[in-house]
Amino acid sequence: MSRGIESAATAGTPAALLVSVAAVNVKRGGYDGEHRVHDHARLRTMLPGIAPPDLLFLAECTYFDTDDERPLWSLVAELNQWRAQSGLPGSYMPFLSSVQGSKNVPGLLVATNNVEIECQYRPGPYTRRVHENFVVTRIHGVEVWLKSMHWNGSQGAAGLAAESVLAAGMAKEPVLIAGDFNCTSSVEGEGLVPDWENKVRKHLRAPWRLQQEGIRRGTTYVQNTEPMDDLLDAGFHDAGHTVSDYTTTTVDPLIASRKTRVLWSPPLASRIRLVNYEVLVVPTAQLPPGQDHYGVAATFEFSRPPAATELP
């Protein structure tokens, strides 16, 4: 369900620009391991009822960099066609991340009609802030750092904590982050799963996920909310919280929680305003194989910074 603060049709002014955002984790980036091809139609399935977004955050771009990046550029071509058929200007510029020890790397597609690309930071010995890439852009005159996230649960609480600390360090910058965080928060309304450990053991039959997504409290495992709580404590705003929409983003209703999110930092909050937000729920019969997350979509109103003559 879409939750709006104000209608997108009335929110825009001559001094403002509406920018659409979507974040989705298509399982393994649509990679079909049996036939060794990417099925990009799965991405469109997971973006129901929306126009091509201006900013598309992809949590898993599995093997997009193989075969001379043909999987990546074939997706870009398909999305550009979708954008043209929808009557929208501009085309997508892709940015793939690289994460040591992982093939399920995040990616970002930016429609260039309203977004100026200034530079891309890649992981390396001189980029300590992040495990993944981020892109510095300018949108409607506003400096915006864009970062697609996929917090890797396979490293457990320690790995999630490391990701959170690095992301929280960006809170002083004008950053918009979105993706699959593999954890929820303890904010009232989130609706933590009751008897979570028992459901993971007996319903999922996946006890290893207790160490990946949980944290031990005495003799019991509970959902690990600390990494997301720490990120929110650093000052990040969450789209769902802003409109009081706590719809879960994982498919299995017995262990459903909010893992796919859109967040922005305090410096950016003075220049953007959330217009609407929704979880992109797909009917069970239409879900791609193995799909365990829904996507989310949001629209922001960007206000142009005051001209130099307007400054005090």
Image (cartoon, rainbow, N blue to C red):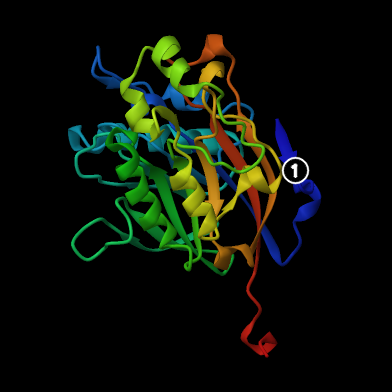
User: Where residue 130 appears, x then y in whole percent?
Assistant: 32, 56
- Which residue, as the protein is rendered here, is positioned at the far front? 218
Quarter of the figure with residue 301:
bottom right
Q: Which residue is mark 1?
A: 4
In the rendered image, residue 239, in percent from the top left (x then y), is placed at: 62, 46
User: Is residue 112 among the parts visible in the rendering?
Assistant: no
Q: x, y (%) of residue 183?
A: 46, 37
Q: In this picture, is 16 found above or below 223?
A: below
Q: Is residue 161 above or below residue 77?
A: below
Quadrant hosting residue 310: bottom right
Q: Which percent across, then down, holds residue 30?
A: 36, 24
- Residue placed most toward the observer, 188 or 138: 188
* Residue located at (39% from left, 28% from top): 219
Element under disc 1: strand
Q: Of the residues shown, which amino acid type is indicated by label 1?
A: Gly
At 38% from the left and 56% from the top, the residue drawn is 165
Q: Residue at x 19, y 32 (%)?
A: 67
